[in-house]
Amino acid sequence: MSDKCVSIARFIEDRFKTNYTNLSELASFVKFEADDIGQVFAFDFVPVNKVKLSSIGKYSLISELFTGVNLWTLLDNIDDFDLIVGKNSVVPADDDIYCRPVVTNTPISYLIPEVSRVLKAKIAKVRNELEAAAKQLANNLYIHNSRHGETHILRTIKHGRCELQIRKVHLDYEIEDYASFDRELLSLQKIYQGDGELFTMCFELKWDGESVQHTALEGFIMDLGKKPLALYKRAVRMQIDNVMLCARSKLISSGKILSRDVKQDRAFFGSLNIGTNA
């Protein structure tokens, strides 16, 4: 599975568990196919092998899908039936979703067909909603990745022969750019909603127009309309200090600038008059 599909699957699985808790035990069965232009197809989460929903899931579903006398009748006899979800063994493309009585002469016999019907309708609705979310995320990921390499200069600071440039760069979405699962989900949520921006911030120091030190910090997440230098001023300050320190070390090693000790030595000995000055 490609990194893009992994990201979509993780997002949908989390959305499944968060928004549809009474069917969340089916989240691990989410599967789909995706192409390179942001299209998702063959989306499904109904398992090939039939699964009996847990007692907790069954109770929660019945409580959601029924009201009045039917609700209380089903809850009073909750152990008399199972909810089964899976694929048809003869026609694998078809769902086989139904309510199965586990005792004979149960008081809820007349409700079995209705329970099967509403369970099928519930799963169809959830599948449609999750498929739509997967398609939206895939399309927005494609749009995001199409901006790969897009660069904006945030700030250029010049002082004498030294120049520091800070750039905002859009790169392809990479899971590794986000340090935790929560950060990854937040980044995918921003892409899904289309109300955020993900980018890498690059810092480059030049000396006499020649690049001396370059560093990049990935995984920035920002709402649209915000100013990155103000929003992430602490991280920016730390990166600037790091770039300046590394660049200074390189310039000293190459002899392009003098170290502090050499400067002090020259200033000290240059100020001495030992009778050799005219």
Image: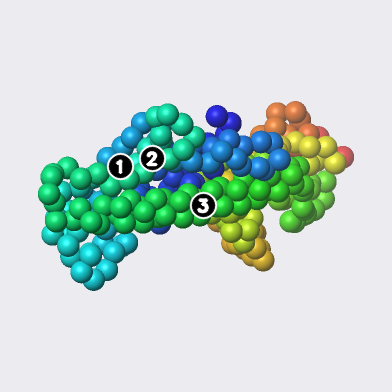
Q: Which mark is residue 96?
A: 2
Q: Relative to 214, is 233 above or below?
A: below
Q: Are marks 2 and 1 in contact (CB under 8 Å)?
A: yes
Instruction: Using residue 72 as the reference point, say whether residue 123 is left or right of it.
Output: right
Instruction: Using residue 100 as the reference point, say whether residue 188 is left or right of it.
Output: right
Q: Are marks 3 and 2 in contact (CB under 8 Å)?
A: no
Tell me where residue 153 appears, x and y as whole percent.
77, 53
The kind of residue tagged 3 is Asn
Nearer the camera: disc 1 or disc 3? 1
Q: Residue at x 27, y 68 (%)?
A: 67
Give the quarter of the image for residue 103: top left
Can the viewer see residue 274 in this picture? no
Can the viewer see residue 12 in this picture? yes
Q: Residues within 10 Å of mark 2 (few under 14, many from 20)?
A: many
* Residue for badge 3: 128
Q: Residues within 10 Å of mark 3 (few under 14, many from 20)?
A: some
Q: Residue at x 20, y 53 (%)?
A: 109
* Residue for badge 1: 84
